[in-house]
Image (cartoon, rainbow, N blue to C red):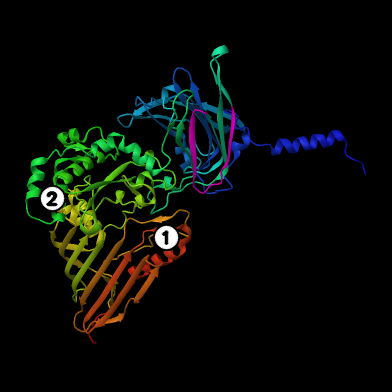
């Protein structure tokens, strides 16, 4: 047998090496193999995938110290609905203290045409800037000639004049990422704590290198911290139902400034404990605005001098401020001037709640700000105290016997212990309290309930009609009041109720609009389905949960419901003479975890009446992904009940 020559072995190994080598991620080096790619094996359903993403950040030290980051991405479009990845928006702020700039934009689309790679570059005239806020802008562009099979690349440079803030690096997007790399070079003068969030495995190297500025005898040398982070095969972060803020679970690397230490200058330490956070707030305009004078002195004096319980007076002061100031839909921790905002009659959450605090103090109450981050902005960190994570506050009022009332002035329909759901967070901080004792859970401050009583009658024409009385307490009342005030007319409001319940409504009467307890009274009529022999009436008359709320095979993210809730229906349905109940829904009493969720249904036929009691309660509102199966099964059984029916046999005349 002839042995292979050394030359042939070398050639064979060279071929293997060439075949197995990693892709060339340099800008402009897109390969034909990448263009021939039709799916991503780690996620075959993906519409697009980041083949590579890179972000390199470094400091520029001159007369000013600034930050520069170079970003580039390579994305493969796998399906037609992935072409929106070619529409790119780059946010930046031109606020004086930050003065960000975006430039050096380059973007190219690559397509395989007749076996050849065709490049289509982005023309500069198709790059636009859009103003999206007072100090915030977007640089926007759309890469041309993008379709299924295209590979796109783009890169840009972003600079900032604020050296103390390093933006978080996101490893996870709404499409998967095959590979990403991040590098940060930080001079020893700036010290940052790192916080890695999420479930993705990220390899982080935290080392050092040398740096210098100046030349010759003026050269200053210093150490540079070199942080490298790499990750591969990162799954897409897909939006799932019942998640307050997707970024709470996104894999990212956060940078928190802990210290600035320049030679010859006293060291400045930054937030690292809640005591530090409180101290910084006490030295800021926040504490000053906590002590402003009440701009509505005459009105508050009248409330204070009048009759009423403490709760009634708190309610009156809240309604006063809500009537005087309209929320501009901006959540803020700090204010430019709450008294000036009161004069204008409009302001941010901070403007309104600073004024609310002043008015309540003038009425004789002791108040404390409760610091928080609204749900859609993400949770406050337990272990990384920082002012940056606090975006708003509500007001806690001290009552007798160590009890408290919570108020917020942004929503005109909110009330005592009735906050907008955005502010019902499980992590809030009591201003001025240090350590673990400062945490506050706002999710369960009120008992929320909807109670429905029905007295109905089925006639021989097959129509169910009668009286509905609904009582909605706290959160359900807030939602109903908001829907009522947002409706263009009462008729439109009635139409929305008819659509929600699947019934016809007559003679609607509302009691307690704008309060914590809203009562709706009306007459209804509905036409159950049926045959010549039978009628089919829904188990709860108005379906409570016609589909499984979760309705999925598995769950990646925690499940976060809106608020604790009790929903109950009590019904008496009178049948025509001679009609009988052939079949009834099954009575149930099911649970999902201790102090979690419960559903109970009891129905019986008594003479010519059908009577049932239905009660659904959700005491616990946050569940881990590992608890999904049990919860999913629970909701499936509730949906089955909601879709079940009374089968009623008609009184068919004898032939």
Decide which of 149, 107 is in the foreground and name it. Answer: 107
Q: Residue at x 56, y 12 (%)?
A: 217
Q: Residue at x 23, y 58 (%)?
A: 474
Residue 38, picture quadrant? top right
Decide which of 328, 128 is in the foreground and name it. Answer: 328
Q: CA distance from mark 2 to mark 1?
A: 44 Å
Decide which of 313, 273 is in the foreground and name it. Answer: 273
Q: Is residue 167 visible?
A: no
* Tag nearer the camera, 2 or 1: 2
Residue 19, picture quadrant? top right
Image quadrant for the N terminus? top right
Decide which of 449, 125 is in the foreground and name it. Answer: 449
Query: Is residue 202 within the magenta segment?
Result: yes
Image coordinates of residue 432 in percent, x first then y, are 31, 44
Q: Vertically, is 392 above or below 340?
A: below
- Neighbours of disc 1 within 10 Å: few (<14), some (14-19), many (20+): few
Image coordinates of residue 353 in percent, x first then y, are 23, 42
Q: Vertically, is 66 above or below 393?
A: above
Q: Name the element at disc 1.
A: loop
Q: Main secondary structure of the magenta part?
A: strand
- Report which residue position mark 2 lands on: 316
Q: Residue at x 71, y 35 (%)?
A: 18
Which numbered marker is on residue 175? none
Q: Which residue range is magenta in the image?
A: 187-209
- Report which residue position mark 1 lands on: 551
Image coordinates of residue 443 in percent, x first then y, are 32, 55
Image quadrant for the C terminus? bottom left
Which residue is farthest right?
Answer: 1
């Amino acid at each position: 047998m002839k042995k292979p020559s050394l030359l042939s072995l070398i050639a064979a190994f060279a071929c293997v090496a060439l075949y197995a080598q990693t892709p060339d991620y340099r800008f402009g080096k897109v390969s034909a193999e990448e263009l021939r790619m039709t799916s991503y094996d780690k996620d075959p359903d993906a519409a697009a995938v980041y083949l590579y993403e890179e972000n390199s950040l470094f400091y520029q030290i001159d007369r000013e110290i600034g930050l520069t980051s170079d970003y580039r991405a390579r994305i493969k479009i796998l399906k037609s609905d992935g072409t929106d990845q070619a529409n790119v928006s780059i946010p930046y702020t031109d606020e004086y203290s930050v003065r960000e700039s975006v430039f050096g934009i380059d973007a190219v689309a690559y397509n395989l045409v007749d076996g050849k790679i065709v490049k289509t570059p982005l023309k500069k005239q198709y790059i636009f800037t859009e103003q999206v806020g007072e100090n915030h802008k977007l640089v926007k562009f759309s890469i041309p000639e993008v379709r299924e099979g295209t590979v796109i690349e783009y890169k840009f440079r972003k600079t900032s004049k604020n050296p103390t803030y390093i933006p978080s690096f996101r490893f996870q997007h709404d499409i998967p990422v095959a590979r990403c790399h991040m590098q940060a070079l930080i001079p020893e003068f700036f010290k940052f704590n790192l916080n890695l969030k999420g479930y993705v495995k990220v390899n982080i190297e935290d080392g050092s290198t040398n740096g210098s500025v100046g030349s010759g005898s003026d050269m200053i040398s210093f150490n540079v911290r070199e942080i490298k982070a790499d990750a591969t095969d990162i799954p897409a972060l897909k939006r799932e139902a019942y998640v307050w803020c997707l970024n709470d679970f996104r894999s990212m690397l956060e940078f928190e400034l802990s210290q600035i230490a320049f030679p010859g200058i006293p060291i400045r330490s930054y937030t690292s404990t809640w005591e530090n956070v409180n101290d910084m707030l006490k030295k800021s305009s926040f504490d000053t605005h906590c002590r402003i004078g009440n701009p509505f002195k005459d009105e508050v004096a009248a409330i204070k001098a009048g009759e009423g319980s403490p709760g009634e007076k708190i309610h009156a002061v809240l309604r006063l401020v809500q009537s005087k100031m309209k929320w501009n839909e901006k959540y803020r921790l700090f204010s430019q001037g709450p008294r000036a905002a009161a004069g204008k009659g409009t302001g941010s959450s901070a403007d309104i709640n600073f004024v609310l605090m002043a008015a309540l103090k003038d009425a004789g109450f002791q108040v404390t700000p409760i610091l928080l981050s609204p749900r859609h902005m993400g949770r406050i960190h337990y272990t990384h105290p920082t002012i940056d994570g606090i975006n708003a506050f509500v007001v806690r009022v001290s009552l007798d016997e160590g009890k408290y009332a919570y108020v917020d002035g942004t929503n005109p329909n909110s009330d005592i212990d009735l906050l907008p759901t955005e502010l019902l967070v499980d992590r809030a901080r009591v201003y001025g309290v240090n350590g673990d004792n400062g945490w506050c859970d706002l999710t369960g401050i009120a008992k929320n309930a909807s109670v429905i009583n029905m007295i109905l009658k089925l006639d021989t024409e097959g129509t169910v009609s009668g009286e509905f009385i609904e009582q909605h307490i706290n959160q359900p009342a807030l939602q109903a009041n908001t829907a009522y005030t947002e409706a263009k007319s009462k008729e439109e409001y009635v139409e929305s109720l008819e659509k929600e319940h699947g019934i016809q409504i007559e003679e609607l009467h509302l009691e307690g609009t704008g309060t914590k307890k809203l009562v709706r009274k009306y007459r209804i009529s509905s036409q159950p389905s049926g045959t010549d022999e039978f009628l089919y009436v829904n188990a709860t008359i108005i379906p409570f949960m016609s589909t499984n709320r979760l309705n999925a095979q598995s769950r990646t993210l925690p499940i976060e419901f809106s608020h604790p809730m009790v929903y109950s229906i009590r019904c008496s349905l009178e049948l025509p003479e001679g009609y009988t109940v052939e079949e009834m829904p099954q009575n149930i009493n099911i649970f999902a975890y201790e102090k979690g969720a419960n559903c109970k249904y009891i129905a019986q036929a008594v003479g010519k009446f059908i009577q049932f009691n239905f009660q659904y309660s959700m005491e616990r509102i946050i569940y881990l992904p590992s608890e999904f199966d049990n919860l999913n099964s629970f909701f499936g059984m509730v949906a089955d009940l909601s879709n079940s029916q009374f089968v009623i046999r008609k009184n068919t005349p004898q032939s």
